[in-house]
Image: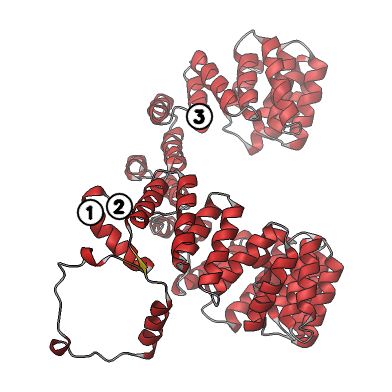
């Protein structure tokens, strides 16, 4: 709730101005020093109808003298609101509303009462507001909402009927927002059905019934009401969209079948076609979805949403050239989020093996959620071009819009160095980052991994234990610490306890299964080690898992099997360090 800011030095000026806005008239002695212009010296200006109507409305407001008591209460309410003393502000404004009967003060009292969660005060203030301004739709709507929230349906219903008579179509379209938290209750549905009964030929009334029925899970009744709405106004898209949404809650197929039939009869229904394409995406029918989005771009030119969606789908389907064409067109259509378009244009250019174009597109991302991913990709492209110093400089010069983005930038700086195995430099970058963000679990984890490369196992353990405190459900933190203890120390019992916890949190993770198998091997349990490692390799034929499984097979006398496994893995990953070290150690 925003309150006016007043200060002692300017108290009189502020109060006079505020009271003028509220329709409160200062006493004559405060105006004695004002210059008076004679009627003869001033030409009478022309008054347009709008100004004349506003003047009449102003004249209808009560003219309340600005007594010392009113001044004091007004000041108390505003200062209390500024200081967060909402209860005092609420009660003082309510007193002012009772005293002045000014509809604007009453409205303010109602707003502050609702903010203070004082329904009794809000009802009283709104009643004063309605009495002072009986034709105010805002006052009537506020009263209806307050009554409904208190469960006083009988009192709210006649007010809603008055509101609906003024504009039935719009009234029913907005009825669910007026009934507020009553929506979703059988009483709310009963109320809407009673109100709609007086408008049997109005599709908006049937639409409101459908919304209320759907909110209490009566989907069949909702669909029946929407069918009546369609009978009254064939091809009405809001009704079709709601029907598709209800059907989609239980079956993509039913929603798609309905929209397909609707579009066959109403081919130019753009919003329904958009919804149809989105449901096709949800159902993984990417070819059909792209066809629909492509049709939308043809039938409704310069539609940024449709061309962007078609571009993303084409990118996902590996058609980078078509994706690029759609996304480039999207930029011409003034999209709501051009940064997202530039980012995915960069992705398309990368898939097309055009690194310079990709870098230029990524540079076009200036703000938002895509800023850091774009800069990270730019940096990766610079590293790939043999320009790591430029990559580091780019990332250092970038400033994120929040802490999460800045953390990701620090990680990206470390990633640039990882390609050249500058582990000490990586460690330093992450250490500096932790000075700024000491409780970043992501930085702590990466710092731990860098520490392991430098044999700083005490740092690794401290970092990972801190990660576990910050994210107690982080299976990878338990896994990393457990694996390191199993691989690099004799603390095997402790390692198995940590890995059991990791496996409990993520029972099918192949890397955790690998760690458990390796810890069992280090503990001398060859059969159990082979069981876990075979499960891990079956789930993910990773070269490091192959190295571990091969070593267990080798140790258990299955050397031919181990050799075949290593040879097969080497063909796919000839530079893997763990695999090569295992072969050097066991097959010199």
Of residues 538 and 39, the one drawn nearer to the viewer in this rendering:
39
The number of discs equals: 3
Asked if labels 3 and 1 touch by Cβ distance under 8 angstroms, the answer is: no
Mark nearer the viewer, 2 or 3: 2
Q: Residue at x 64, y 63 (%)?
A: 145
Q: Secondary structure at mark 1?
A: helix
Mark nearer the viewer, 1 or 3: 1
Residue 227 x %, y %: 82, 79
Indicate how the structure is coloured in the image. secondary structure
> Hey, which residue is sitting farthest right in the picture?
220
Left or right: where 386 falls relative to 574: left
Q: Residues within 10 Å of mark 1 (few under 14, many from 20)?
A: few
Label 1 vs 3, first from the N-terminus = 1
Left or right: where 94 falls relative to 71: right
In the image, residue 400 above or below residue 559? below
Asked if labels 2 and 1 touch by Cβ distance under 8 angstroms, the answer is: yes
Mark 2–mark 3 Cα distance, whole angstroms, equals 51 Å
Residue 132 visible? yes
Q: Residue at x 50, y 45 (%)?
A: 87
Q: Secondary structure at mark 2?
A: loop
In the image, residue 373 above or below residue 342? above
Q: Residue at x 44, y 74 (%)?
A: 332
Task: Return the residue at label 1.
Answer: 10
Of residues 455 and 541, the one drawn nearer to the viewer in this rendering:
455
Task: Return the residue at label 3.
Answer: 446
Task: Return the residue at label 2.
Answer: 6
Label 2 vs 3, first from the N-terminus = 2
């Amino acid at each position: 709730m925003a309150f006016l800011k007043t200060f002692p030095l300017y108290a009189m000026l502020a109060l006079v101005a505020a009271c003028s806005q509220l329709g409160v008239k200062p006493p004559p002695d405060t105006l004695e020093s004002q210059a008076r212009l004679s009627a003869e010296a001033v030409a009478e200006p022309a008054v347009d109808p709008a100004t004349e109507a506003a003047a009449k409305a102003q004249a209808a407001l009560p003219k309340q003298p600005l007594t010392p008591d009113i001044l004091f209460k007004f000041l108390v309410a505003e200062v209390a609101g500024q200081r967060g003393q909402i209860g005092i502000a609420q009660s003082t404004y309510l007193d002012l509303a009772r005293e002045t009967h000014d509809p604007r003060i009453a409205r303010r009292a109602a707003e502050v009462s609702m903010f203070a969660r004082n329904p009794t005060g809000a009802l009283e203030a709104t009643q004063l507001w309605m009495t002072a301004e009986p034709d105010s739709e805002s006052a009537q709507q506020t009263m209806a909402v307050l009554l409904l929230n208190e469960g006083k349906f009988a009192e709210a219903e006649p007010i809603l009927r008055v509101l609906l008579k003024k504009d039935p179509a719009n009234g029913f379209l907005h009825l669910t927002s007026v009934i507020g938290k009553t929506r979703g209750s059988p009483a709310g549905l009963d109320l809407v059905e009673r109100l709609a009964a007086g408008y049997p030929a109005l599709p908006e009334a049937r639409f409101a019934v459908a919304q209320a029925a759907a909110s209490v899970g009566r989907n069949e009744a909702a669909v029946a009401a929407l069918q009546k709405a369609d009978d009254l106004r064939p091809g009405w898209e809001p009704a079709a969209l709601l029907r598709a949404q209800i059907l989609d809650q239980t079956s993509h197929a039913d929603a798609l079948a309905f929209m397909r039939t609707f579009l066959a009869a109403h081919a130019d229904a753009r919003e329904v076609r958009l919804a149809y394409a989105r449901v096709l995406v949800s159902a993984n029918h990417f070819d059909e979805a792209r066809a629909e989005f492509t049709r939308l771009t043809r039938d409704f030119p310069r539609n940024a949403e449709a061309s962007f969606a078609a571009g993303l789908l084409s990118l996902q389907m590996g058609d980078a050239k078509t994706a690029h064409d759609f996304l480039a067109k999207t930029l011409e259509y003034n999209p709501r989020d051009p940064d997202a378009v530039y980012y995915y244009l960069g992705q398309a250019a990368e898939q097309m093996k055009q690194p310079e174009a990709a870098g230029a597109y990524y540079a076009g991302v200036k703000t938002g959620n895509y800023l850091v991913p774009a800069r990270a990709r730019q940096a990766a492209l610079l590293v790939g071009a043999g320009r790591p110093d430029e990559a580091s400089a780019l990332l250092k010069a970038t400033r994120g819009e929040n802490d999460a983005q800045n953390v990701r930038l620090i990680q990206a700086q470390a990633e640039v160095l990882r390609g050249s195995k500058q582990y000490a430099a990586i460690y330093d970058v992450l250490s500096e980052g932790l000075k700024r963000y000491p409780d970043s679990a992501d930085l702590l984890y990466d710092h731990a991994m860098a520490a392991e490369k430098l044999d700083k196992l005490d740092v690794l353990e401290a970092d990972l234990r801190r990660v576990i405190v910050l994210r107690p459900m982080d299976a990878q933190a338990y896994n990393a610490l457990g694996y390191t203890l199993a691989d690099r120390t004799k603390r095997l019992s402790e390692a198995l306890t940590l890995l059991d916890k990791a496996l409990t949190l993520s029972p099918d993770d192949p890397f955790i299964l690998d760690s458990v198998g390796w810890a069992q091997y280090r503990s001398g349990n060859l059969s159990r080690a082979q069981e876990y490692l075979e499960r891990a390799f079956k789930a993910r034929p990773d070269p490091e898992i192959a190295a571990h499984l091969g070593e267990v097979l080798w140790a258990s006398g299955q050397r031919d099997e181990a050799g075949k496994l290593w040879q097969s893995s080497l063909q796919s990953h000839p530079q893997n360090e763990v695999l090569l070290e295992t072969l050097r150690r066991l097959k010199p």
